Every structure is written in structure tokens, then in C-alpha cells.
Amino acid sequence: MRVRFAPSPTGMLHIGGARTALYNWLAARGSGGSLVLRIEDTDRERSTPENVEQILDALRWLELDWDEGPFSQAERGPEHADAVRQLVDSGHAYEDDGAIRFRVPDEGEIAIDDVIRGEVRFPLGALQDFVIQRSDGTPLYNLAVAVDDRDMGVTHVIRGDDHLSNTPRQALMLDALGAGRPVYAHLPLLHGPDGKKLSKRHGAASVQELRETGYLPEAVRNYIALLGWGDPESTTFFSTDDLVSAFDLGRVSRSPAVFDEQKLRWMNGRYMRELPVPDLRERIERRVGRDVPEEAVAISQEKLQTLADFWPLAGFLVEPQPVDEKAWEKVMTNGGPEHLRAARDALAAVEPFDAAGVEAALRAVVERLGVKPKDVFQPVRVAISGTTVSPGIFESVAALGRDETLQRVETALQRAGAPSA
RNA sequence: GGGGGCGUGGUCUAGCGGUUCAGGACACCGGCCUUUCACGCCGGGGAUCGCGGGUUCGAAUCCCGUCGCCCCUACCA
């Protein structure tokens, strides 16, 4: 099996394109075949080196490797021209105002075999003679695709459903050229939450955006694999290896799917929780661009859904964060400062200064003061983190260390105007 | 207008003529846990399978029609 992913370089790779790339990749890897990357850049206006690079970056990030290419369709002008000439010579195409049109028979029909849709028939009478070469001598999409797929030995064309209507044109040319037709597989399109089709223009959800939002490539792969395909057991989590062996083109759904970021978030969180701490730490550091204590990662892990969640949740373990006024108001009233002072005194004497020790000390304070646990814990939390949301308070205090904790508590006490002694 | 595709709870899906076929997941609601937020666990509401016919003892599953959405119909891809 030899497949190809042939994006047009319009910039961002949106998730629909990413899924097409994934399915092609899965088909190739699962069959021991190869994947060819071809850039459909015959429209020079929107094909820039930067746009091409963006597509490649997105694929690399998704860890979808290709075996050959990227090939530039625009650089295959001679081959396209040869094919056009051959079609003209054989009477299958003719000149019209300088352009070359392919001659579509007026009657009859053409049947396309599609792995996903079954046999699809098109009455030829509904097809116009279409232009295959511009008057400036450059080829058009339908011709270029057919010729390139033929020349590159593509055996299976796996692409979006929006190309199904183009298929009879391409097949007609292949037939006229005396070339065999590849096996076709047209994937259902992806729509946005608003029901509209997903594209660069609408709604977005491009691979680069997913990356910036802090999703893991393996989670994205798993999620988008399920957009249009599912195994009989309704399995939800697939390692990439499992995906390769379980994926079956013939089982791909025929109806459009809607990209649901909430589910991706959930799934991403599940992947994050299963990551070894050192691995997660490395990814977080790469994202925030600075070193992060392993402990901070370890105690945050179960609360993260994306890499972007780390800093707001545990950035205070790296450096002091601004105080959230609402949080402050909420916990520093009704005896907050007083409880905080008691907590400070208890923490000063904790030995050893670990989560268990901190917990014992803080709970003792709660008991002695006869208040609720949160009456003590929350002021401490705000004092060290600046807000009311953080990893477990005992773990956080322990991770921060005695000196830093005491210093922040002291600062908070002064801010509260409470006598520190 | 012409041609083509698609239609299972809000969303992704399983199912492909008959042992709970309406299953699983996200989301949602309630509870437990509990130091916040999450995680986790337990429970719940929600689809008669777009709609209408037909075939059949029996259809989400087969056929026809109809409606809706989408794609192609460019010297875009």
C-alpha cells in the first residue's frame, strides 16, 4: 500500500487535515506500506515557503513521519504538460481560448469504488468539459492530482469527502491516460461546534493552536483518530501502536463529525496523568521556558488537563505570584490573619518539613483553634500561592520549603496589617 | 438549477433483520471523597435511531419517497 497526504499550503494545518494525515499514516504503517508527502501548490498565490513549513511543522509535532517528499506539485510542470499533450493527441482534450479542456463524454456514467462509501455512480452528462491547463500553460488541480498519483505509484487515495465529486474527473483522466485507478477512500468532513464546516477561515482549531493550548501530540492523535472511526468494542484509549494495528479504513464512518474540544481536554488530562513525572516535567519546562522543580510537577499532575494549566496552578512554586484580590478578601477576613499566624508558628517548628509533617502541624492548629480545616488551610494557601486554587496544601507547603513558606506567610501577615508577633 | 454524499441523545461513536438493539465515551445533574480546584468512585436525566411509507412474523438495521445539512458544478485546491 502506498498512500499520500497532499495538503495545499494555506498556512495552518487544521484538524481536518491533521486527521486525513493521521489516517493516511495509520494506513501506511499498518500495512507496511509507505506514505508520500506532496504539497499541492499549483496555485502559486497561496503557496509560500512559510506556509509549507507550517504544514511540515504541524506534522512533525504530531509525530507523523513520511517516507518520501515533500514533493512540490508545482515543480512537476513538465510531467503535467506531457500528460496534457498526450490527452490532446489522443483526442481526449482540446484547446479552448488558449486553455486546454478535457472532453467528457456526453452520455453514460462512471462508477467509482470507494472503500468507505461503496460504489458511487456519476452520470457523465452532468459533468462539463473541464479545464486541465490554464492558458498560461500551467496545470490545474484535477490534472496534477491524477498525474502525480499515477507517477508516484499511489495505490490508495485517502482524502476528505469534499473531493468525492472531483473523483470522476480524475478517474476519467487516468482512464484516458491508460493508467490504472487507485483505490479511493473518502473521509467524512469535520465540522465545528457551530455545525459549520471546519476550515482555516471558520472556527479554526488548527494543529498549531492545539499545540499552543498545551495538548499532547499523542492525545491529539488519539482524539482525532476517533473522529470518524471507532472499533467494535468502542475502545476510547489507543496507544499509537494499538491505533496502527486496530485502524481499519473500511470501518471509517461516512457522516461528518464535530470537533469537541471539551472531550479533547478530558482525554489530554488522562494522558497527562499517565506520563512519568520526569517526562511531564520536561514538557512543562519546554513550554514555560524555564526550569521547574520536579516536586512542583509531581504534586500538580493530577490536576492538569493541559500543559498550559501548570503555571496558573503551580507557578507559585517557581516564583511568587501576584495576589488575587478576590481570593484575599475571601479568606483573610473572619480571623484569617489570626489563623495564619498560628499556622506560621506551627510550621516554624515542623520537623521534618515534609507533607506529612506539615499536615500534622496544620491539623493540630485546626484542633487547637477549634475552627474548620479550611479556616486555616485557605489563608495559608493564599499566603503562599496568592490564590485559592493550588495543588494539595500540605504538599505545596512542603515543596516550597520552610524558609520560603515562612517568608511568604510573613509577607501576607504584614499585608493583612496583623501584628506578626 | 444539475450531480454527489450524509442523517443513532448536545457531541464522538457501537450496532448492520430477532438473546436488553438502543450499548460506551465527553458534556450535564445529584451524591461520596474533601483543605481549594481537580482527580477518582457511585447514581441520574437525555435518542423510538431525520420524517413518511413499504418489505417482513419481526427493521435503527432492507427498499422507495420526503426533508435537512454538506460537497462538486472556477483558467482555486
Image (tube, rainbow, N blue to C red):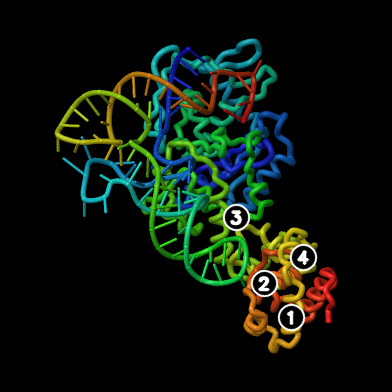
Question: Which numbered dot is residue A217?
Answer: 3
Amino acid under disc 4: Arg
Question: Which numbered dot is residue A342?
Answer: 1
Q: Residue at x 63, y 74 (%)?
A: A373
Q: Earlier in the sequence, mark 4 or mark 3?
A: 3
Instruction: State the residue in front, A399 or A73.
Output: A399
Number of the front mark, 1 or 4: 1
Q: Which residue is mark 4?
A: A290
Q: CA distance from mark 1 to mark 4?
A: 35 Å
- Evaluate whether label 1 is on the same chain as label 4: yes
Q: Earlier in the sequence, mark 3 or mark 1?
A: 3
Number of the front mark, 4 or 3: 4
Task: Pinpoint the chain carrying mark 1.
Answer: A
Q: Position of residue B57 (x, y in %)?
A: 14, 34
Q: Residue at x 62, y 74 (%)?
A: A372
Q: Which residue is mark 2?
A: A375
- Evaluate whether label 3 is on the same chain as label 1: yes
Q: Residue at x 48, y 29 (%)?
A: A164
Quadrant in the picture for residue A69: top right
Q: Is A322 left, or right, of A220 in this rendering?
A: right
- Evaluate whether label 4 is on the same chain as label 2: yes
Amino acid under disc 1: Ala
Question: Which numbered dot is residue A99?
Answer: none
Q: Position of residue B49 (x, y in %)?
A: 35, 35
Q: Earlier in the sequence, mark 2 or mark 1?
A: 1
- Evaluate whether label 3 is on the same chain as label 2: yes
A226 over A218 or under it: above or below: above
Q: CA distance from mark 3 to mark 2?
A: 41 Å
Q: CA distance from mark 4 to mark 3?
A: 21 Å
- Other-residue count near label 4 (Cα within 10 Å), few / some / many at <14 / 14–19 / ≥20: few
Amino acid under disc 2: Asp
